[in-house]
Amino acid sequence: MIKLIQKFISKVLNNLFKKKKHVKLGLYGPPNGGKTTLANRICQDWLGEDMGSVSNVAHETREIQIKEQINIKSGSKELTFNLVDTPGIATRIDYEEFLKVGMKEEEAKARAKEATKGVIDSIKWLDEMDTVIIVLDGTKDPYTQVNITIIGNLAARDIPVLIIANKSDLKRFNQKKIEAAFPQYDVIGISGKYGKNIDKFYEALFTFAGK
């Protein structure tokens, strides 16, 4: 009887351990911060394929995208997660933004509608996340209403957060501004486009996604 109980407890603990090693990892942030570029980098490095298309036009990603069973390794450490790339969060989406980049009115209005739905879906999906990576454009002012709103929502949900200062390959990149704006969080500077410092990011995932 004692052996049966020990076997049951061992099975429960193993299941808990496995669940902890398999998490939903969400990429969040404002439009054009480089979320999908980072998602593509992760998928290329570990799956050999892209996750989605990227564009200089805001709100290229307007639907939740998921890649399952991404397994990363570092020495003896191993982590499996489902990667969730979310549409960029914005407090206001105006179809006129898209007219300025050459879209016709009908297309611009459709894109604005899709982008608005994408923002709503992104916020809804927060409750599904085990860990969130906030991807910010390191060349822009980080202290914005959008960023404060995202981080405030995560703090309220007590979700582990890692901030990525992206686009370190550009001259105006300033990681210190992001660190000063959100001193309560760890910030890692990378170039998702060129893979600069990406190993440090992967190493951090074992700490933050393993919580």
Image: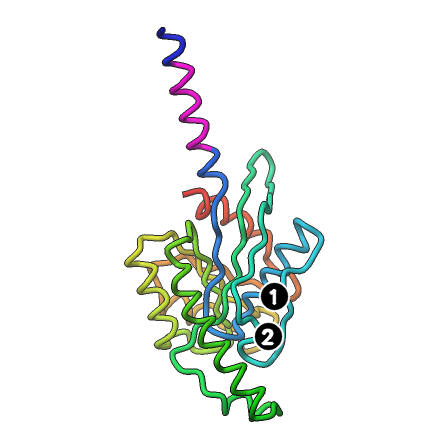
Part of the protein shown in magenta: 6-17
Q: Quadrant of the N terminus?
A: top left
Residue 70, image x and y in percent? 59, 47
Q: Main secondary structure of the magenta part?
A: helix
Quick one: SS at disc 1? helix
Circle nearer the viewer, 2 or 1: 1
Q: In the image, is residue 210 above or below residue 152?
A: above
For this view, does 97 lie left or right of residue 128?
right
Residue 80, image x and y in percent? 55, 42
Q: Nearer the viewer, residue 53 or 166?
A: 53
Checking the image for residue 114, the label placed there is none
For mark 2, what is the residue? 170
* Residue density around tag 2, few if under 14, some if 14–19, many if 20 or more, within 10 Å: few
Residue 157, image x and y in percent? 31, 55
Q: In the image, is residue 71 above or below residue 93?
A: above
Q: Which quarter of the picture shows residue 7?
A: top left
For mark 1, what is the residue? 37
* Residue density around tag 1, few if under 14, some if 14–19, many if 20 or more, within 10 Å: many
Q: Is residue 14 magenta?
A: yes
Q: Which quarter of the picture shows residue 180?
A: bottom left
Quick one: SS at disc 2? loop
- Image point 36% across, 53% down: which residue? 159
- Image point 50% across, 69% down: which residue? 87
Please, what is the three-letter code of the amino acid marked with disc 2?
Leu
Residue 63, image x and y in percent? 53, 67
User: Disc 2 to disc 1, how far (Cα)?
Assistant: 15 Å
Please, what is the three-letter code of the amino acid marked with disc 1?
Thr
